[in-house]
Image (cartoon, grey):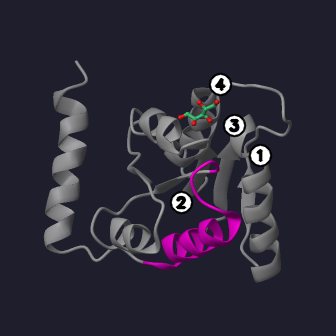
Amino acid sequence: MKPIAIACDHAALDLKEEIKKHFDETGVEYVDYGTYENKSCNYPDYAEKLCTAIYEKKHELGILVCGTGIGMSMAANKCRGIRAACCSDTFSARFTRLHNDANVLCMGARVIGAGLACDIADIFINTAFEGGRHQTRVDMITALEEKLSK
Ligand code: RB5
């Protein structure tokens, strides 16, 4: 598997560092697309950096964290080929990989703690898409990108 892409805004810098530390301890490779400091910034900039890298096929999966996870997921879902899921529980993380082939996980640093966030991240990166009938539905999502982007 290609390295995981990870990025955050200022609100989730500490959570991103906790996730990176967990990945270092468990041998998961990643590339950090920023932000690298506590200074206030705009989350769409970091969603764009990470989603561009996925669009360019440098990564298969990415993790975006902000205060709620919601702004990042909204921004990421505007990007071609991105299926971002904002998750605060492990069940959703598992099923968004199994059924939606989500390629970006978003989480909120003001919503969940680091322990849960690391569990969610592990499940997300270690669960494969089921395909089959779910592929048809994912293809329908992709078709919407064309249909409603004019
Ligand atoms: C930043 O204050 C906050 O708005 C951002 O991190 C995020 O929660 C947006 O959805």
**Residue kind at label 3, given as amino acid type:** Asp
Q: Earlier in the sequence, mark 2 or mark 1?
A: 1
Could you say which disc has been placed on residue 61 in the image?
A: 2
**Residue kind at label 1, given as amino acid type:** Leu
- Distance, label 1 to label 3, CA atoms, is 6 Å
- 2 or 3: mark nearer the eye: 3
**Residue kind at label 4, given as amino acid type:** Asn
**Location of the N terminus (image quadrant):** bottom right
* Any part of residue 49 in sight: yes
Q: What residue does disc 3 label? A: 9
How far across and down, in percent of the image, does residue 127 sit?
45, 78
How far across and down, in percent of the image, does residue 101 sit?
35, 63
- 2 or 1: mark nearer the eye: 1
Q: What residue does disc 4 label? A: 42
**Residue kind at label 2, given as amino acid type:** Leu
In-image side of 111 versus 144 (left or right): right
Q: What residue does disc 1 label? A: 13
Q: Are marks 2 and 1 in contact (CB under 8 Å)?
A: no
Ligand 1, image quadrant it occupies: top right
Q: Are marks 2 and 3 in contact (CB under 8 Å)?
A: no
Q: Are marks 1 and 3 in contact (CB under 8 Å)?
A: yes
Magenta segment? 109-127
